[in-house]
Amino acid sequence: MSPRAAGRVRYAVVGTGARAEMFVRALVLDHADTTELVAFADVNQARMDAHNRWLGELGHRPVPTYPAGDFAAMLDSERVDVVLVTSVDVTHDEYVVAALRAGREVVTEKPMTVDVARCRRILDTVTETGGRVTVAFNYRYNPLHEQVRRLLAEGAVGEIGSVHFEWLLDVRHGADYFRRWHRDKATSGGLMVHKASHHFDLVNWWLDATPVEVYAAGRLFFYGEDGRRHGYARDYDRAHGSPAAADDPFALRLDAHPRLRELYLDAEAEDGYQRDRNVFAPGVSIEDDMAVLARYSTGATMSYHLTAYAPWEGYRVMVNGSRGRLELDVAENDFVDRGTAGAVKGAALHGAEAPAEGGGATLTLRPFWAPPRQIPVEGRSRHGHGGADARMTGVLLGGQPDPLGRAATADDGALALLTGLAANRSFETGQPVRVADLLTPR
């Protein structure tokens, strides 16, 4: 019997960093009539204690906390129905597999995991147990992206021949991946996995297709130790306590953000994790400028580019078909204000608050032999990833209807992940990579 059929669903959250807060608030505020938060698990007690303090601010009782090593015991002790995995990417498979084998459902943050072996392990466990894994691809729930899905499914551009997709991370948001654990490809899979899996999943979903072959080129151009040649680097390892970081627009000031200070600065004594590394310090093993060419099962192709050091933030998607072209242009912010550059997008709650700079979105249909038509943008918000977070938690936690099939399965998570992993392999070899070959046992 599904947990939903038996009354209030009991959730545990494993991984209590900043992203967990969005799920926690949804559980205890938005869907408290159907869900119950019953436990936290993490490698760091201070972070769990911070989340419990914030629960008190919301009028909710503290919940039991468990060391990550006691995860399996927690599932039974707290009678957990569903596990929410918001830990460091490289650890996702550990909790997903343990939960499935214990007969629990799983909702995991994207990416589902970071490498081929871990992906295979999750897929094999889903097959072995018959369990359910849902990947939290919140971009599927953005009203704009839903519009694109409907238009393409209705044949607005006819048969799809190609997609061009450009994503720009500005020097505030993009820089943040180079301050924290994401800078190490072994823990994050790099931006082709951690960030671009969002975008690869959208294209799979929009085209109703699967990736077949990927060719890619990427490099570390702007950040890292070699990026010092551009003239922006200051001489410090981490920002906190460093005079050299005082007026650095690339420095994150943890003590200026109470939530971040509690989650990271006050928690450092337990595990030594530093959230505010210099983006030009040694140790960066991920790329910041990446180009991908992919071919899909329908015959369509995609050209994709991700830039992590842009002066503005947003994206452009162009879909070319047998009846015309659909263009989506989104400016999430049109520049980065230097005075607030040394911050995190959304401050303490990633993606939840709009930046101060301007932005906007347009959706244009360009049919053959007719003037272009501006399509009114529906339901776009400047909060929570364009309104996607609330819509996603409504489906995943609240059981709301999902006629567009936005809830992504483990197979969906694998397909998005494998596009990025194929790109990473192509970076290394300089050769095209067949996606199916990645999961073939060696």
Image (spheres, rainbow, N blue to C red):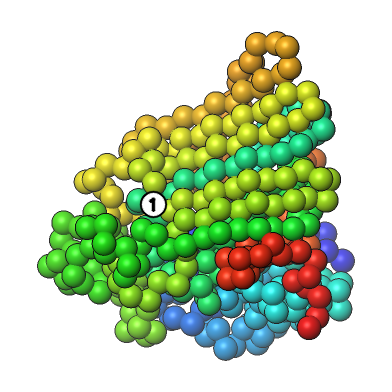
- Measured from the top left, where is residue 364 in percent x and y? 62, 23
Please state if 108 lies on the left or on the right of 286 as rendered.
right
Query: Along the line of sight, which residue is nearer the eye, 314 or 37?
Result: 314
Residue drawn at (78%, 83%), measured in percent from left and top? Answer: 442
Q: Residue furthest left?
A: 243
Please state if 348 lies on the left or on the right of 140 as rendered.
left
Residue drawn at (63%, 15%), measured in percent from left and top? Answer: 372
Q: Residues within 10 Å of mark 1 (few under 14, many from 20)?
A: many
- Measured from the top left, where is residue 15 in percent x and y? 53, 72
Q: Secondary structure at mark 1?
A: strand
Can the viewer see residue 37?
Answer: no
Please state if 188 lies on the left or on the right of 36 as rendered.
left
Please state if 376 lies on the left or on the right of 57 as rendered.
right
Residue drawn at (59%, 31%), measured in percent from left and top? Answer: 328
Residue drawn at (76%, 37%), measured in percent from left and top? Answer: 161
Amino acid, disc 1: Tyr
Q: Is residue 95 above or below residue 292?
A: below
Indicate the quadrant where residue 105 lies.
bottom right
Query: Along the line of sight, which residue is nearer the eye, 10 or 107?
Result: 107
In this figure, what is the number of numbered marks? 1
What residue is pinned by disc 1?
A: 309
Can the viewer see residue 341?
Answer: yes
Q: Is residue 207 above or below residue 293?
A: above
- Measured from the top left, where is residue 44 in percent x and y? 44, 81
Q: Is residue 292 above or below residue 287?
A: above
- Measured from the top left, where is residue 137 in percent x and y? 64, 54
Q: Residue furthest front?
A: 430
The quarter of the image holding the N terminus is bottom right
